[in-house]
Amino acid sequence: MTLFINNDVVARVLTMKDTIEALENSYRQMASQEAVCRPRVDIQIPTSDENKIYQWGTMEGGSQSGYFAIRMKSDVIYEQEYNGVVTQEKYCTRPGLFCGLILLTSTKTGEPLAFINDGVLQHMRVGADGGIGVKYMSREDSKVVGMLGSGGMARTHMEAFMCVRNLKKLQVFSPTPANREAFAAEMRAKYGIEVVVCDNPRDVYRGADIVAGVTDSAVPVLNGEWVEKGCHVVNVGGGGGRPDGKTLNKVDVYLRFGNAPAPWGLPEMALEDEYITYAAQPEFNSNFKMKRSGKRGHGAALPDRMITLKDIFSGTNRGRTSSAQITYSERGNLQGAQFWAVGAVVYEKAKAEGLGNEIPTEWLLQDIRD
Amino acid sequence: MTLIISNADVEQVLTMGDTMEALERAYGDLRTREAVCRPRIDIQVPASADGKTYQWGTMEGGSMRGYFAIRMKSDILVQEDRGGIPTEEKYCMRPGRWCGLILLTSIENAEPLALLNDGIIQHMRVGADGGIGVKFAARENAEVVGMLGSGGMARSHMDAFMEVRKIKKLQVFSPTRANREAFAAEMKAKFGIEAVACDAPEQVYRGADILAAVTDATEPVTDGSLIEPGTHIVVIGGSGRPDPKSVARIDVSLRFGDAPQPWGLPEFGKARSRLTYAAMTEELAEKHMSPDARRGGRKALAEDRVVWLGDIIAGKAKGRTSDSQITYSERGNLQGNQFHAVAGRAYELARAAGKGREIPTEWFLQDIRD
């Protein structure tokens, strides 16, 4: 039987500790060529509504250790401006619903093992990457987290940070007072740490050992002027997923987890780009601010200050070399290496506990060869 | 509800005529950029120590006419020597079973509409391409088909050839006598034509107006020294190529088109039959990857003699310009542009006929945003 595993099941069986472990294992395998992934590929097609575009996006990869996965997203996307703030909106079939699916297969037999809704896993894998960055780059004695944002990604990042450092204090700001208050209360109760709700972004940075920008803003939310010495910086969402220029200027060591390899036999097609986009109607300009028509995805942020996880794993570089350095970590275009690893954990646990809906695997197989 | 559509469903509703019409329209739409696709991408992972390889392969594309589709294959490959002819065997889970799936979505609301087994569609679309090549490049009065191969692809090619030319005679060779004789008898009964099972491959070429090599051999099976003037050549299968002597004799090479370049990456627009990302070292690749994959796929054949299908349809070019020319047709790397068109049509027909199994669309959707 092939399983359909929904977000409730994923939330029940997947821990942040498992996620971090699974991802680190995958990144090690990427470094030794036991695992592989390719860059994210998006397809864009204008819909009959000129303000909306259909976007299909996939990430994929697999490993000799037994699993392959493709993550597929199928959404109608558009942008909205509210009080001068641009956000990307999306839905599948109707607003409030989204389509993100992982298909997990066996690299030993080819079997289609499971379809997994990607919502919970998506937040976990992004948070876990934040945690892996902190594990290898932040000061061992990091105690204070400064956080911009109080949504789902803020929650998974706190969970990941708690897994890898002995944190004592959180300082959080987000634009809506009720949201940041609620988040603070939740973190206080969950981790028993001191939580300070800031009424301006400036205060988040004071004494912070880790600063995390975790919002869906269309523009960078970090402000490099306020980043203090010894700080480790994490940023997701917000202006193409990058910190502001001032923060980048102050970074001493930049950890990029790695890149997808080149396709076999085509070294000239090695790519650092976050995504590749094929679009119908190349002349059509969506005027989107977050993903601009005709533009490439970004590559390595700071090539001159860059190290990779491969360098750290092989012992050729130890990352931070002084407690005064400012460090920054991001994944690179390895997204495809994440879903087989985390999906496998979810699948094995769900199966062991008898969770998920079943359909006959025979429906997905056939007796006609291509 | 999302439909699961089996090969039996597709076989009952989809005709070769439908398939050819859908494909011709999709090729025209790609030319005007109302449709889009990207090249085939494979992921390869060693599956066992004795040389088996897991191969995941996808093709994808969509059109402003309304559908997007990804075709996914999940198989174990085994390189085998069949009586001196190297062939590629494959299976999913157990010999005799394969996994090839098409996920069809709507570009208007992103809804996952159907999962289709790809067996019948795969044969139909490849056969249809053979037929489209014949339609635009074979002599108008072509009536004799020489065929190497007697499997499923031989059948779909005959279906397609019969749609576009008044074929009177088939000459077929394949290594197993019983297979070629059964195929000849079947074609004779089905189309009321003369059908000769040949004892040697060279007999196939004599007087043939169309030569079709439709086998799964991994090396070229055609013999260019036997091809007569005026012949149109179609080749599919493991090697997907005519032998060098045939290539040298081709006067006109009809190419249907290629995947467009992605945003900002013109070097990705250079047509390759596929891109392979592999989880293996050079040493393992010797054992696990086919020569074609190791080379990075194939480039366009006889590039100096290429005529584009779009230019012929637009009246800007001619295929064959004399009866004595030897012509050849191949698709180009626009496989991804085939499945939204053909699976979209099959979906409409299956739905109208009340075919397919239903599973809840909710299983594919979620209320968590990424």
Image (cartoon, rainbow, N blue to C red):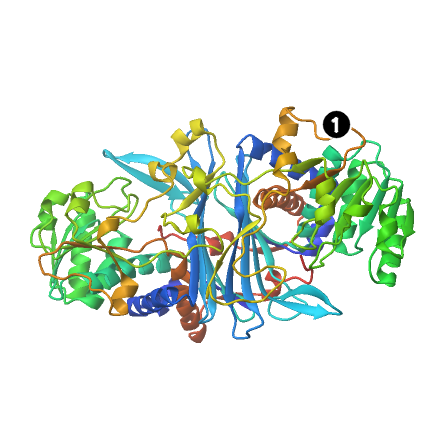
Name the residue beneath numbered marker 1. Answer: A321
**Residue A271 in picture, x, y percent from top left:** 51, 43
Q: Is residue A293 above or below residue A226?
A: below
Residue A241 at x, y = what percent?
67, 51
Q: Secondary structure at mark 1?
A: loop
Asked whether A218 or B150 is in front, the reply is A218
In front: B103, or A131?
A: A131
Subunit bearing disc 1: A
Q: Residue furthest left?
A: B207
Name the residue nearer the viewer: A366 or B322: B322
Q: In the shown orientation, is residue B159 left or right of residue A273?
A: left
Is residue A244 in sight in this rendering?
A: yes
Q: Is residue A57 left or right of residue A268?
A: right
Amino acid at pointer 1: Thr
- Classify mark 1: residues with Cα within 10 Å, few (<14), some (14-19) or many (20+): few
Question: Is residue B48 rendered to the left or right of residue A338?
Answer: left
Give above or below for A350 relative to B284: below
> Looking at the picture, how far across and down is residue A42, in whole percent?
53, 56
Image position of B180 (left or right of A18): left
The residue shown at (42%, 68%) is B34
- Is residue B116 visible in the rendered structure shown here? no
Q: Position of residue A206 (x, y in %)?
A: 88, 45
